[in-house]
Image: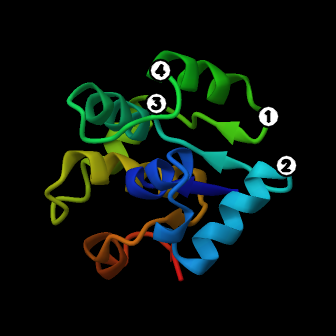
Amino acid sequence: MFVTDTHPFVHHVTGRRNRLGRRALNIFDSVKRGRETMIVPFTVLEEVMLLSEIGRIRLPLPFRELLVSIRRAENFDLGVNDTDLLLEAATFTTIRDPYDRLIIAQARVTGVPLITADDNIHDSGLVRTVWD
């Protein structure tokens, strides 16, 4: 089981596989085959929704349909979205990006690695990261 950051999830759903690190690509392939489970935090989905609304990304289907398909898929999990997550995120005062704080908290609360190429997250040492 893994948690995904926003950028790898966007690369995955938009078919830009060449933008994923080697290990990240292998994990997404395992998820697609049903061999692995991916946690897609609520925060990631919110970011994807906003990015698609302002035209920064083009999704292969309308956001609402994407969300419904993820919610129904057995190999994707929407994770937790509660006060424990916020309490965990509140401790990461060195991380300025509020989305990153919640995504890191999701990985820590669930105890699984985070798929990300974000150097700030990796260098923070707050969570195990996977990319190349």
**How far apart in space, not on screen, are marks 3 and 2 (Cα)?**
24 Å
First reached walking from the N terminus: tag 1 or tag 4: 4
Q: Mark 1 or 3, which is nearer the eye?
A: 1
Marks 1, 4: nearer the viewer: 4
* Amino acid residing under circle 4: Pro
Mark nearer the N terminus (3 vs 2): 2
Mark 4 residue element: loop
Q: Are marks 3 and 4 in contact (CB under 8 Å)?
A: no
For label 3, the residue is 81
Disc 3 and disc 4: Cα gap in Å? 23 Å
Picture coordinates of residue 96, whole percent (x, y): 13, 57
The circle drawn on residue 74 is 1
Please tell me which residue lies in front, 67 or 38.
67
**Mark 4–mark 2 distance (CA, rounded to whole Å):** 23 Å
**Amino acid marked by disc 1:** Glu
Of label 1 and label 2, which has the lower sequence position?
2
Q: Are marks 1 and 2 in contact (CB under 8 Å)?
A: yes
Q: Which residue is mark 2?
A: 34
Whichever of callouts 1 and 3 sits on the residue coming sooner in the sequence is 1
Which residue is under mark 4?
Answer: 62
Q: Which mark is residue 130?
A: none
